[in-house]
Image (spheres, rainbow, N blue to C red):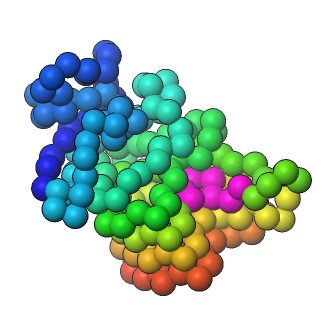
């Protein structure tokens, strides 16, 4: 397993040799994901420092997650991943062993119109295995036609586990908080508000 550190509060992205350490972290999740090679033998934990990860700090949304990645914040109140309504926050497609812990996912936005199907304001998960542990999913929106599903999270053909999760103030035409299709889902201490 590998440990990689990210801090949105530093002034510029770290792009030299030896970046991603506790003493010399990357600035964005976007860049850190390009610098790692997670695998079954090498699960990578991205340790996310307190702060807001947003377009204002250089994040590019949506963030597309590969297999075998753990995103671990400091806590839900201080580690915020915020797309600021510019796009969806995360896409997880055909990925396994993904974990989110101790963070908030917010500000995601998708719009479904006559041209296509675009569900999942905060997260779009397809054919994947994902664990959420001590996470808040809030203020995400999927708007448009009746196919605008899953404001907070949309998932299909996936194995999803929620443990100590708050899903709040998300909006969609259907499934404002969650919209799960053909999924195996475990919900333990989940508040959908």
Residue drawn at x 58%, y 73% as measured from the top left? 156
- Closest to the observer: 151 or 98? 98
Residue 69 location, x and y as percent? 29, 55
Tell me the quarter of the image containing the C terminus: bottom right
Tell me the quarter of the image containing the N terminus: bottom left
Q: Is residue 182 above or below residue 94?
A: below
State which region is magenta.
118-124
Residue drawn at x 12%, y 34% as measured from the top left? 22
Image quadrant where residue 164 sits: bottom left
How many discs mark residues in the rendered view? 0
Image quadrant where residue 155 sits: bottom right
Visible residue check, residue 178: no
Residue 17 location, x and y as percent? 15, 23
Locate residue 9 relative to residue 89 in the image: left or right.
Answer: left
Q: Is residue 11 above or below residue 137?
A: above
Residue drawn at x 49%, y 75% as measured from the top left? 158
């Amino acid at each position: 397993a590998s440990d990689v550190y990210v801090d949105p509060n530093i002034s510029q992205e770290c792009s030299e040799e030896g970046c991603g350490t506790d003493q010399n972290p990357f600035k964005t999740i976007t860049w850190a994901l390009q610098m790692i090679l997670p695998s079954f033998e090498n699960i990578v934990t991205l340790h996310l420092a307190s702060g807001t990860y947003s377009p204002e700090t250089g994040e590019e949304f949506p963030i597309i997650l590969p297999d075998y990645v753990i995103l671990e914040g400091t806590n839900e109140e201080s580690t915020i991943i915020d797309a600021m309504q510019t796009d969806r926050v995360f896409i997880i497609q055909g990925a396994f062993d993904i974990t989110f812990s101790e963070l908030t996912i917010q500000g995601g936005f998708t719009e479904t119109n006559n041209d296509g199907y675009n569900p999942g304001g905060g997260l779009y998960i397809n054919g994947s295995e994902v664990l959420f542990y001590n996470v808040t999913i809030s203020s995400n929106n999927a708007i448009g036609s009746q196919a605008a599903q899953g404001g907070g999270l949309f998932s299909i053909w996936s194995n999803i586990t929620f443990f100590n999760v708050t899903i709040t103030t998300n909006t969609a035409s259907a499934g404002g908080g969650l919209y799960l299709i053909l999924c195996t889902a475990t919900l333990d201490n989940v508040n959908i508000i």
